[in-house]
Image (spheres, rainbow, N blue to C red):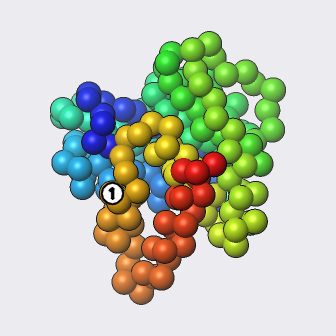
Amino acid sequence: MNNIKKAINILIAGFGGQGILFTGKLLAEMGLIEGKEVTWMPSYGPAMRGGTCNCSVCVSDTPIGSPVVLKPDLLIVMNTPSYDKFISDIKPGGMALVDSSLVNSETKVPDGVVRFDIPAAKLAVENELQGMANIIMLGKLLKETKSSTLEVAEKALKKIITQSKEHLIALNMKAIRIGYNY
């Protein structure tokens, strides 16, 4: 997040159980490590796992007025219902990172928005990283936005993954690198 000069508003959306909230928490922790102002605000329905959920993350050099992201600069989307719901909300000049192995939609990207299709769920299965498509998407975000580094991502993972699950840090870093290099 060290290249962010003012603020970036990120919306991550998909089904519960896809790691949407974890991805947001990881982005927020990365911002904190770099000394930024951050907010992380999850939103999910009563169904949770399997129901739709999204997460707003704001990272800024200055204090943040509201944690709610209504017009994202960046959208990470992991399913078709979320794509259809949020794609038209991206600010002109923004970016959409789409899990193309799960999103099947005729909804067009607004003018001035760049779309990256990443078959993250497919890549996760092919690399024996089931359940880490979200982290592959994060790797692609780091590559395309140059908003932070792999080193900061690893530091953030070490802070938010509990000691009993620290074996997952290496797997998460593998997933980040797959997305980064895609």
Q: Residue at x 40, y 56 (%)?
A: 150
Residue 4 image offset from top left, x and y in percent? 30, 34
Picture quadrant of residue 75: top right
Q: In this rendering, is residue 20 above or below 54?
A: below
Asked whether residue 29 appears in the rendered view, the answer is yes
Q: Residue at x 58, y 32 (%)?
A: 96
Mark 1, Cα crowd under 10 Å, few <14 / some 14-19 / many 20+, is some
Q: Which of the two residues, 80 or 148, is positioned nearer the viewer here?
A: 148
Asked whether residue 82 appears in the rendered view, the answer is no
Residue 169 image offset from top left, x and y in percent? 45, 73
Q: Residue at x 26, y 29 (%)?
A: 5
Picture quadrant of residue 133: bottom right
Residue 45 image offset from top left, x and y in percent? 58, 50
Q: Is residue 111 left or right of residue 3?
A: right
Q: Is residue 148 left or right of residue 133?
A: left
Q: Which of the two residues, 95 or 3, is positioned nearer the viewer here?
A: 3
Q: Which part of the image, by quadrant, shows the N terminus? A: top left
What amino acid does circle 1 point to? Val
Picture quadrant of residue 38: top left
Q: Secondary structure at mark 1?
A: helix
Query: Mark 1 sits on what residue?
Result: 152
